[in-house]
Amino acid sequence: MRFYGKEALCPCRCDGAARRFTGCLCRVPAGKLTLSLRDSQLAMTQPGRYFVHKKLVLTACASMLGLAAIAASAEEENCSLESLHGTMAWSEVTSTAQGAASSGSGQESYDGKGHMKYYELYSDGVSSQTYSGTGTYTVTENCVATVTYDSEVVPWVYFVSADGDHYYWNNNQGTGRFSAGRADRISRGLLVK
């Protein structure tokens, strides 16, 4: 219910002589408005008795509380090592500067403490190779992760969602290959052993 000066606007529709209101706006003097529960409806008592469905009022109140909770949680979203926890899966198409293409896919299991294990499959259309190993990672408060696979010198840079459900990457290795993509969490468990 919204109050404007000396009047209150409430959702209602006049149902003839029964004086039940649902759906439109009616003006009620604000100084003479009292709310009380009666049967399955919320009654606003004043001269003439006006009724508003309790469900409508409760739904509006619940909606306002929900929006306030969402706004409060959005302000507090930060990342940490724990943001990357579980198993992520990805796929990509890769090209070289000379135009040769290949594809790859894989799984990476992050322990939430800075260590990970991976399993990957690559194919150039003629042959395929698999890779597995371990790595380490860090995650900044603003959700930028750096991941070092095995003994690579240059870490990969990932942009992680605050809930850790996915991340985006762009190949920054400087090896003559380029690729970019997205990885999605497929399990909160560590599937790569």
Image (spheres, helix red, strand yellow):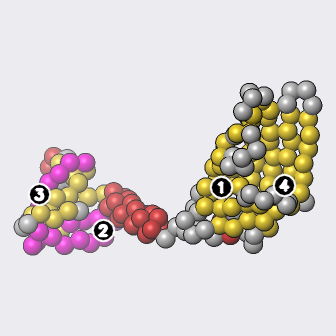
Of callouts 4 and 1, the N-terminal one: 4
SS for callout 3:
strand
Of callouts 4 and 2, the N-terminal one: 2
Q: Amino acid at mark 3?
A: Arg
SS for callout 4:
strand
The reply, left or right, for residue 189 in relation to residue 146 is right
Q: Amino acid at mark 1?
A: Tyr
Q: Which residues are magenta?
A: 23-44
Real-space Cα separation, disc 3 to disc 4, in angstroms: 65 Å
Real-space Cα separation, disc 4 to disc 1, in angstroms: 15 Å
Residue at 84% across / 55% down in the picture?
A: 118
Give the percent coordinates (x, y) of residue 190: 82, 61
Real-space Cα separation, disc 1 to disc 3, in angstroms: 56 Å
Residue bearing mark 2: 38
- Front in this rendered view, residue 188 or 174: 174
Residue at 90% across / 53% down in the picture?
A: 132
Give the percent coordinates (x, y) of residue 81: 68, 70
Image quadrant where residue 125 sits: top right
Q: Residues within 10 Å of mark 4 (few under 14, many from 20)?
A: many
* Residue 18, visible in the rendered structure: no
Residue bearing mark 4: 118
Of callouts 2 and 3, the N-terminal one: 3
Real-space Cα separation, disc 4 to disc 2, in angstroms: 62 Å
Real-space Cα separation, disc 2 to disc 3, in angstroms: 21 Å
Q: Are marks 2 and 3 in contact (CB under 8 Å)?
A: no
Say which of marks 4 and 2 sits in front. 4
Q: Are marks 1 and 3 in contact (CB under 8 Å)?
A: no
